[in-house]
Amino acid sequence: MRTTSISSFDYNLPNSLIASSPLDKRADSRMLHYNLKGKTYNDYKFSELLELLSAGDLLIMNNTKVIPARIYMQKETGGNIEILFNKKINSKTIEVIFSSSRPPKPDSLLNIKKEHLFKVISINGKYLVLEIIHDESFFSIFQNHGEMPLPKYIKRPVSDYDKEKYQTVYASEEGSIAAPTAGLHFTTDMIKKLINKGVVIKYITLHISYNTFKPIVVENYLDHDLGSEYIEIDESVFKCISDAKMSNSRIIAVGTTVARTLEFCYANNIKKSFYGYINLFIYPGFKFQSINCLITNFHLPMSSLLLLVCAFADKEKILNVYAHAIKKKYRFYSYGDSMFLENK
């Protein structure tokens, strides 16, 4: 009988293996290739993906762009408050996650160096709804005052190079608070060479919010509220998937966000262009319909992302893969190495 206890998805990771900084060259990262059918491990450089893929294989990537989503502000009382963009409600109203010794009061103002930028509309737990009281758009405010929202487990100040490195080379659609990290390993040159080889590359958009990383705080993960996130997908993506299936080619989701987007569409029989919110929670027992390969980084213990990967490749196999990666001293999490899971 399958357990739904999140504690059973724990593993021990030495702190020394948590990647706190990016590599100088993206494609110099390591890639653990695991064939689910052959049950074989192979250790590669990510750049060697060029040799592993063939003409007709389909790579699907998330072209979302990270915004400088974290801003340090002051309340009217003079106290400090940190806000993290979560989602746009309309052109003048946004939802953010906040951290402060005391919550701000409704109708109070938030400022930077005495310049008032937001009015607090409502408070719900750790979430605030803010109204923009400035001439700037909310994107402009974050671009001018925000910093790149590195995960909190990276225990160093944000640097200028994070503006480039914590962004995929193909990022184009602004709206995420985190990078689709599986894509961080690709270079523009790699993408050109893959296309020249005949690999088909398509893009979807999923704007990553706090919901992607929201900790599972209930023991039974079925009680976890995943929340929703905004996606855009063009009809041509479904056509390419259909063609790849017909030719028995690999269909590779670059990252868990791509996997969730595609599987939501297939689960809901969406085969036309779609724009809207999805809330698909993937955990062991889920039957994948769209992809047969997944490129993904190594994820935190007891996270919804780890559950998705275990759903794709089997919990016992994945925990064994993670044990192999730890033994081989792979770098973990957002700035870390990746694995290529092949079920083909």
Image (spheres, rainbow, N blue to C red):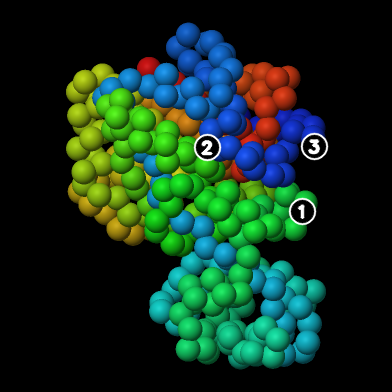
The residue drawn where x is 29% and y is 29% is: 196
Asked whether 318 or 250 is in front, the reply is 250
**Number of residues whose C-alpha sits closer than 10 Å to that of mark 3, classed few (under 14), some (14–19) or many (20 or more):** few
Q: Is residue 256 left or right of residue 120?
A: left
Whole-percent x and y of residue 56? 26, 24
Whole-percent x and y of residue 104? 70, 82
Please say if 16 is above or below 208: above
The residue drawn where x is 56% and y is 14% is: 42
Total labels: the figure holds 3
Could you tell which of marks 3 and 1 lies nearer the N-terminus? 3
Looking at the rendered structure, the secondary structure element under dot 1 is loop
Q: CA distance from mark 3 to mark 1?
A: 14 Å
Please say if 250 is above or below 162: above
Q: Are marks 3 and 2 in contact (CB under 8 Å)?
A: no
Q: For the N terminus, which image quadrant?
A: top right
Q: For the C terminus, which image quadrant?
A: top left
Please say if 298 is above or below 55: below
Q: Mark 2 is on which residue type?
A: His
Residue at mark 3: 15
The residue drawn where x is 52% and y is 51% is: 167
Looking at the rendered structure, the secondary structure element under dot 2 is helix
Residue at mark 2: 185
The residue drawn where x is 54% and y is 10% is: 40
